[in-house]
Image (cartoon, rainbow, N blue to C red):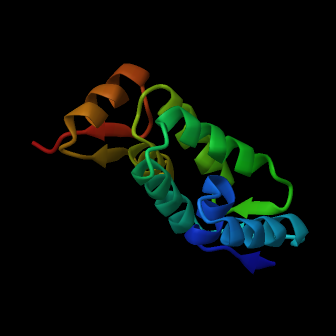
Amino acid sequence: MIALDTNILARYLLADDPIQAEKATQLIENSEQCFIPITVGLELAWVLRSNGILKEDIIEAFENLLMLQNLYFQFSSTWYQALIWAKQGMDIADALHVALSNECTGFYSFDKRLLKRGEREHIFPVCIEPK
């Protein structure tokens, strides 16, 4: 198994550098197993957003990557949950933070949008503002 950095996945998805995009595509398509650390996935979401990719398209890109048989996302079930919440309106990073906290009784934040979304969608762990 090999591990992939954010820039490999970014070139694969964005194809903004033809030479690197081809190398990334060959690497991904010809490797038996590729490991995607959770931090790489989170950074990839940020890179795509920074490149002007719409949230809906970022979600679709992650869904497509998760379906590739040779890509192994660290905490893949957490990614699926985070993408469900992101489709419901949560920020992708926030959704991932909360989903990764699934064994906790509460997720404390000052982020008003996250708190409202968490309450409206009955997200667990419960999103709570510190008193």
* Residue that appears at 59% across and 49% down: 78
Q: Position of residue 81 (x, y in %)?
A: 58, 40
Where residue 23 sits: x, y (%)? Answer: 76, 73
Q: Is residue 80 left or right of residue 124?
A: right
- Report the front residue among 28 and 11: 11
Foreground of the two, 114 or 122? 114
Specify whether residue 101 is in view: no
Residue name at image x 33 percent, y 46 percent: 107
Q: Nearer the viewer, residue 18 or 24?
A: 18
**Relative image position of residue 65 (x, y in whole percent):** 72, 51
Does residue 93 show up?
yes
Locate residue 89 relative to residue 114 in the image: left or right: right
In the displayed structure, would residue 52 be above or below residue 1? above
Compared with 89, 16 (above or below) is below
Residue 130, quarter of the rendered image:
top left
Between 44 and 51, the one lying in front of the other is 51
Q: How many marks?
A: 0
Q: Residue at x 86, y 64 (%)?
A: 29
Figure quadrant of residue 30: bottom right
Above or below — where is 31 with respect to 53? below
